[in-house]
Structures are given as structure tokens and as C-alpha cells.
Amino acid sequence: MGTLWDFFSLSAIFIGVAYWWDAVRIKELARNIGKQACERAQVQILDDTVQLTKLRLRRNARGRIALWREYRFEFTPDNQVRFPGQIVLHGQRLMRVCVDSPAVIDVDAAP
């Protein structure tokens, strides 16, 4: 028969695997969002990847706690210069995409 320690150990492993699975899925979502934003802006995403820069818990509009993730990526309009881009997700909801300094697409402010 298992002990309480075994139960907590297995629970911690399960929670870790569930977080990792969700993180991989959300990172793929962010990568696809970045690629689509670059296509709309007629620029090329570089390295075909995004990097997680911030991770924290925040309440959503309904008051539920969800993970706030900020990703960065780089893009180029001419294969000469790299520019930074940013994607912000709250849970699975897209909050913001920035594909260059002056052009910010704020999802909440869009009509």
C-alpha cells in the first residue's frame, strides 16, 4: 500500500508533465501567431521560433487565474536587419502582437 509521500510524489510528477505538455502546446500557438502576424506585415520571421520571456499568474476578465505569457521573436523586412517582435497570451487568449515598434496590434482595442 502506498504512503502519503508516494501520493505527493506522483501528484508532483503528474502536475509537472501536465504543465510541460501545456507549455509546449501554447508555445506552438505563439509560434503560429507570430508567423501569421509576420505574413500580414509582409516581413519574414527569423529562426521560425519564439522565446518565452515572462511567465506569471494573472486574473482574467472573469476573475479566474490564468498564466500570462510573453514571448519574443525576431523578424526582418529585407534579410539585412533584425527587429524584435512580441506576443502576449493570457491563458490561450491572444492579448497583443507587436511586429515592429510603431505597429502594435492590441487585440482588446480592435473593433
Image: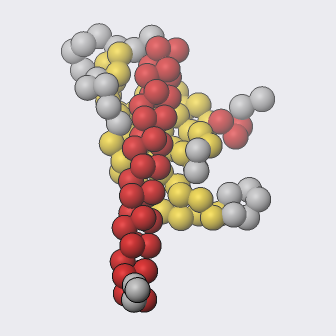
The answer to whether residue 14 is above or below residue 20 is below
Which residue is found at the position 26% from the left and 26% from the top? 47
Q: Which is more toward the observer, 8 or 74?
A: 8
Determine the residue positioned at 72% across, 31% down.
110
Q: Nearer the viewer, residue 47 or 97?
A: 47
Image position, residue 60 (x, y; %): 68, 57
Examine the rendered structure and indicate whether residue 19 appears above or below residue 34.
Answer: below
Q: Is residue 19 left or right of residue 59?
A: left
**Quadrant assignment for the N terminus:** bottom left
Residue, far front: 1
Examine the image and state in which quarter residue 46 appears.
top left
Name the residue furthest left: 80
Quarter of the rendering containing residue 101: top left
Left or right of residue 53, residue 94 in this image: right
Instruction: Locate the C terminus and report the quarter of the image it occupies.
Output: top right
Residue at x 32% of width, y 31% of height: 49
